[in-house]
Image (cartoon, helix red, strand yellow):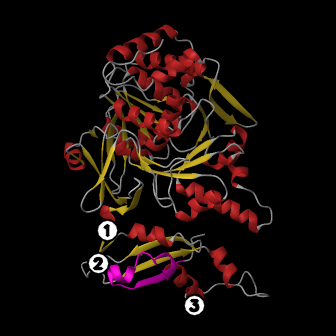
Amino acid sequence: MSIAPAAGLDRPLAAPLLDWAETSPSRVALLLPGGDAVREVTWEQLTHDVLRMAAYLRRSGVERADRVVLWSDNRYEWIVIDLAILLLGAVHVPLHGSLSPPAAAAQIAHAEPKMVIVSSEAMVAGLQRHTGGLALQRPIEVIEGGCEWLPLLERTANLPLAEGDEIVAESAEQFDPEAITTILYSSGTSGEPKAVALTQANLISNCRAIVSVFEEAPDERRLNFLPFSHIYARTCDLYGWLTGGSQLALARGRETVYADCQATRPTMLNAVPFFYDRVMQTVLQSQRDGAPVGIRDLLGPRIRMCISGGAPLPVSTFDFFHQHDVPLLPGYGLTESSPVISMSTLDAFRRGAVGKAIPGIEVRFADDGELLTRGPHVMKEYWKDPKLTRETIRDGWLYTGDLGAIDEDGYIYITGRKKELLALSTGKKAVPTYIESLLCRDPLIQQAMVVGNDRPFLAAIVVPNMELLRERLTQPGADPNAAIDLQAAETCAPFQQAIAQQLRDLLVREVFALPVLIGMLSPVP
């Protein structure tokens, strides 16, 4: 049942699944918390479900290079369907579970799939109201079943494994590392969906680099709650687990992450900065309430590292985790780069940096500071958009649109988006996101927005940390719940001090010859 190495390049992305089923059939692969129990799925059980699902898709008319849309949140069936599509050599087009029916219908129309699979009957009803002239080649499949269908896994349960074995053999014979294996709709910075087409070689090279950098062992256990429909979780959680042969726990949802961490005891976690900030705020609030909890009380006693991606990580959050002996390791990438370009590790991280370039790729900076990258991780194309593809990939280099720098030790720093540059009326230019990240280093400032386009000065609107502000302003014996005048001089003073401190190394006046004006907005309840 194993897939032999493909001549000249590599093995199919799904090949490790079959390896683990053959060498470690009874070892736990997946943990699925639910209620008071955690369901365990072995590599053999998972592989049998995948082989039967591949046979079901084949019987439904799905062939190599056909597109299959899956509109669903994370669940066990998502993994089974994805790996079955990989075995068939078809193209998986995952849609975000939170998409509205009109948005999902538009992306389905653009993808022109052979098959559409959704979580529930409600999704089918939503699509039927918004598909208009969309002509599907076959009825929509529903994972959960309903009045007209059995649940999808039950429909595949009695199919012979031999059909799946035949598909495996064909997968080995017809493997093409440059074939498109997934199309992901990424909004980027413009808000217009872009269909990023990634190949087997893109994903294989990226997840192998990740596993090699972290030296992943079979006893590693990661907990996933980020959507697999985003490439960050799909490569770093799903395919990293598959390649390394470790264990993957699926959180029931974002609201249950702490409970699921306690139930499954992960050793590592991939998440976005917002989540880590929430962890930090939970710990700080518990201290103020007199019932302190630590990071490991929330994320489990075995957690040994947390990885951050998807957005810039505030240095204050980085500092907090490291002060509490839980390494928080930022990385950087794009959907168009499969996605990882650089990573921090336990042995190589630097405050404010996003790590070093992963093995096997190239990184350089253009004269204007834009980061460019070249290697096997760069997407094949924007599907159906050759013009945008030519604009984004030139001479093999992917133009990321991000501004940054690299130090003498190879650590990469991201300072902002090229398209977000503010052009002031004086002719000077500023990177607002970089200045905003500096301002948010101070715990008194929760959020900041720098403006100034076509004006002779920069201005910053900041959202205060109201609890911390109240603590600093409340005098002994005063009413702790009294209203705070955000425009009063005594209220503005600590913000002026914080801003001056955070921008001291930026030399704003020398660089821009401009004052920085500060306004404040009360946080939205």
Image x and y of residue 28, in percent: 64, 25
Label whose residue precedes the other's in the sequence (3 or 1)? 1
What is the distance, in whole Å, between disc 3 and disc 1 at their CAs? 32 Å
Q: Residue 127 falls in which quadrant of the image?
A: top left
Disc marking residue 205: none
Q: Residue 378 falls in which quadrant of the image?
A: top left
Looking at the rendered structure, the secondary structure element under dot 3 is loop
Q: Residue 145 falls in which quadrant of the image?
A: top right
- Label 2 or label 3, whichever lies nearer to me, is 2
Mark 3: give few (<14), some (14-19) or many (20+) Cα within 10 Å. Answer: few
Foreground: 134 or 437?
Answer: 437
Foreground: 370 or 476?
Answer: 370
**In the rendered image of this protein, does residue 350 appear above or below residue 240?**
below
- What residue does disc 1 label? 421
**In the rendered image of this protein, does residue 382 appear above or below residue 144?**
below
Mark 2: give few (<14), some (14-19) or many (20+) Cα within 10 Å. Answer: some
- Label 3 or label 1, whichever lies nearer to me, is 1
What is the distance, in whole Å, between disc 2 and disc 1 at their CAs? 9 Å
Q: Which residues are magenta?
A: 500-521
Locate the C terminus and report the quarter of the image it occupies. bottom right
Disc marking residue 488: 3
Judge from the rendering whether residue 343 lies leftward or rightward of residue 486; answer left or right: left
**In the rendered image of this protein, does residue 503 appear above or below residue 270?**
below
> Contact (CB < 8 A) between labels 3 and 1?
no
Image x and y of residue 110, in percent: 31, 39
Judge from the rendering whether residue 494 lies leftward or rightward of residue 371; answer left or right: right
Identify which residue is drawn at 54% across, 74% down.
463
The amino acid marked with disc number 3 is: Ala
The amino acid marked with disc number 2 is: Leu
Q: Does the magenta portion include 113? A: no
- What residue does disc 2 label? 424
Residue lying furthest bottom: 489
